[in-house]
Amino acid sequence: MNFSKADCKSKMVHGMVMLVFICSTCLVRVQRVEAADPDPLVDFSANATTPVFRNIFVNGDVSLGSGGVRAALDIGKFPGLTSEGLTVVQFKMVPCGENVPHTHPRATELLSLISGGPLQAGFVDTKGETHMNILYPGDLIVFPRGLLHFEVNVGTETAFYISALNSQNPGTLDAAGAVLQLPERAAAIALNIDIAAVRAMKSQRPYNEPPTLEAAKPGVCVPGQLITTTV
């Protein structure tokens, strides 16, 4: 079988295109792997003296807000978590308390309500659709990585719940606080309000760091009422 120069050139171009495609696919796969926490290289961290951490609400990374207590564990507080790809947070949220809307840019979160509540919890996806649920003791909810989510205790009892995140450094971005860190003009356009209103909000709403649970203002929430998934 004879091939013309044009046929050979066409086959060479086709081969180069396929090679570029294969290399690009491999690069994407490598980048996806590297974006996650690395696999552990040892069974248990050499920096850890025990796999047990006691009394997280005393010895953990504790923040106390008007809406309750948040106690977190990371590798700084608990070396046993080193290279395990985990962060754990426990909450005691008072009625009408809120874990204000936020995102975790590097982790998916799994939340489990142990007692009290119920909790109104949900997230907004990239299509702008709200996924709202009411959680009762024994229920769990997943918050996909990077999506805006929140929890409110809509019941009459303190809600005790636990969150596990699949990264030892998930990050927490306070949504409202982040918007108010933008230039005033940008924030005013985004919120469809005037600059004076942005300035007033900035004076009343600092960035939530470290993350704390906040209580609703009087009249905003009544314990045990409006237990609904309606937006």
Image (cartoon, rainbow, N blue to C red):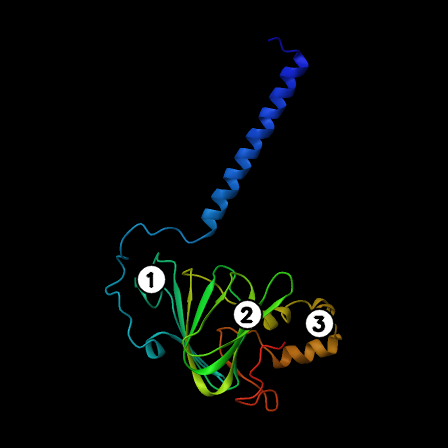
Q: CA distance from mark 1 to mark 2?
A: 25 Å
Q: Is residue 109 left or right of residue 59?
A: right
The earlier-in-sequence mark between 1 and 2 is 1
Residue picked out by circle 3: 191
Mark nearest the camera among 2 and 3 is 2
Residue picked out by circle 2: 149
> Which amino acid is tagged 3?
Leu
Q: CA distance from mark 2 to mark 3?
A: 19 Å
Q: Which mark is residue 81?
A: 1
Residue 180 is situated, as x and y percent measured from the top left of the image, at 64, 72
Q: Is residue 122 left or right of residue 49?
A: right
Mark 2: few/some/many CA within 10 Å (<14, 14-19, 20+): many
Q: Is residue 135 left or right of residue 206?
A: left
The residue nearer to you, when weighing 114 against 99, is 114
The earlier-in-sequence mark between 3 and 1 is 1
Q: CA distance from mark 3 to mark 1?
A: 40 Å
Residue 83 is situated, as x and y percent measured from the top left of the image, at 35, 56
